[in-house]
Amino acid sequence: MAVAKRNRSETKVDPSVGHFALGTSGAKNIKDAVEQIRLLERQVAESKTHLNNIVTLIQYCEDDSPKIIHAAMHALFRVFSPMLSKGELQKPKKATAEDKKATVTLWLRDNYVKYLNRMCAILDLPEAGLQVPALKILLDLIKLESAHLSTLSGSHHFANDLYLNVVDALLNCDNMSAPLLDEFTQKYFGFYDDLRFYFLKNAAQIINAALGSKPKKDNKTPQSKKQKTTGQAPPAKLALILGNAFAIMETLKSMPTEAKELDEFWTGNPDPNNEKKEYTGESFGFSEDEDDTVEDLTKDTSAAHVKRHPLLTLFNHRRVFSDCWTALLRLPFTAVIYKKTLLIVHKRIIPHLPQPTVLMDFLTDSYNAGGAISLLALKGLFVLITEHNLDYPDFFQKLYMLFDRNLMHVKYRARFFSQVDIFLSSPLLPAQLVAAFIKRMARLGLSSPPASIVIIIPFIYNLLKRHPTCMQLIHGKADSEKNDSYDALQDDPMKSNALQSSLWELQTLQNHVAPNVATLAKIFNEQFTKPSYNLEDFLDHTYATMFQNEITKKRKGEAAIAVDAPKGLFVATVEETAEEEGEQDAVVPGWESWSF
């Protein structure tokens, strides 16, 4: 239902008519107000002559006390629910001033709209105990409206006019509490196919409107008043929408992959008997905009001139998913959300897009950004290249440029090396290219922390086993940087002259101060008969794990120590008497306090 704007005036209820003034405080006043709310509700249920009590109950919803608000909004839900089911809030087709029934219906609709406005506003209150019940009430009202519309039309309908306002309230919520987020995502958004479908559809519309984008031109979709756009919203509002939208979207860990998985609907299955009923999309009086209909995204090709409901087609779910993410990616990202998006793009986003190449610009720009952003964009870009025929000729050159000193210190180092191991696994790669990566990693090993070196050494060993042509690096003549033909400053791996060089860096690492590193580097002195290393065993090494391994290692014997314990910190050697041979340590005069 389209929710009109409301003038929220702080109206006081006149005590002379038996109602308590709003804004009262104190335990007794709150208890009396709750009792009064129950009385007003009973009177409305008993007789329509007390319909004016609805106005008072709506005013109670604006009280300062959470208990009073809680009681009032549930009372109004119980008042309006039977009216919705009976069709008493349906907009009259021809209303005249003489028609008293139509006048009452329009008055009830106006107060119902005010109630919905207030419920959406409660979602923004800093009280989670009110946010969660308000969300439940709004979604229950959506179910009731949808059931009534379906009964009138004889086919399934979803009350998206009301749901659009709920989605808008969630995306613009300044106080998105954890209970509210969990309630919506776990019990509704992530479970019911229709609520997820229309959330994605509505969220894309809201985000595009905030960005000042024009709606897509589609001859099949009527242009409603709500689709008209204005200028771009302020940066603070865009940041708010981004944070709330991403918080909801990142909880979506699975999407239906087959049409038969579309079987959970909050408002009922559109086709419970698997019958192809025609979908009309009429609003039947609940919508304020007579031309605002639900968009039918596809046609059922198996039956001529019969349209299936968009909720029953998997392509439509993937399409609104794509539209929502496309709109979301146009918002000004923060660094944190940018990284989180890149972490999930290859598993949760790309597999469910009808055209994954829409992310081509986003991922290539991220890959070219450098730093941690490039490392995180690597996987998503590689999926587009290998699975969706994306042409990116400079992929390996950009990958080669990512190997710098900063790489060995970032938190995503393990993820990066596990992906590079996949990228360099093909035996069809040029030997010059593979040799360049081997030399780049060996050179970085000279200035990397031990936790990074223990990843580099087995990685180089595996590459040499996989590409035997590069074995000549072990027998090269270069023994230092002075006579090394490898150009470490060259960004193009094919021009670095790596294959004409040698791995003298590994000889240097055999004398590393860390015993784990030195022992691991000596593997290159032996014959290459051992199987390839499992990189997963080396990716999680840190200073802490290496230190823990050292202190828990079993020793063959006690460590060598001094034979005689010294007598003090500062000692001097004095000559003994002629009868006694040898030397003896004595405390230096004046430093007796330092003796042990």
Image (cartoon, rainbow, N blue to C red):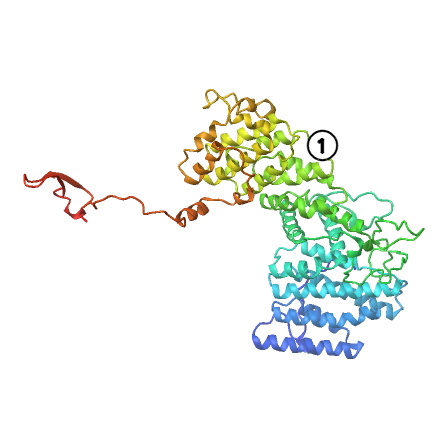
Where 284 sits versus 376, above or below? below
Q: Mark 1 points at which residue?
A: 391
Where 30 sits versus 175, above or below? below
Nearer the observer, 94 or 591: 591
Task: Tell me where residue 273 sits by quadrant.
Answer: bottom right
Position of residue 414 in the picture relative to residue 146 (left or right): left
Residue located 59% across and 22% down the image: 495
- Residue found at the very far right of the displayed protein: 304
Position of residue 501 in the picture relative to residue 366 (left or right): left
Residue located 46% across and 33% down the image: 447
Task: Tell me where residue 427 sits by quadrant.
Answer: top right
Q: Position of residue 117 (x, y in %)?
A: 72, 61
Where 44 sits versus 352, above or below? below
Q: Where is residue 550 in the image (x, y as percent from the top left)?
A: 41, 46
Residue kind at label 1, given as amino acid type: Asp
Q: Is residue 412 visible?
A: no
- Residue found at the very far left of the displayed protein: 578
Q: Label 1 crowding class (10 Å Cα cut-off): few <14, some 14-19, many 20+?
A: few
Where 389 sits versus 473, above or below? below
Nearer the observer, 196 or 427: 427
Count of numbered circles on the image = 1
Helix, strand or loop under label 1: loop
Q: Where is residue 519 in the image (x, y as percent from the top left)?
A: 44, 38
Q: In which quarter of the image is the N terminus?
A: bottom right
Q: Can residue 450 be seen in this view?
A: yes
Position of residue 384 in the picture relative to residue 489 (left or right): right
Position of residue 564 in the picture relative to residue 548 (left or right): left
Task: Tell me where residue 385 sits by quadrant.
Answer: top right
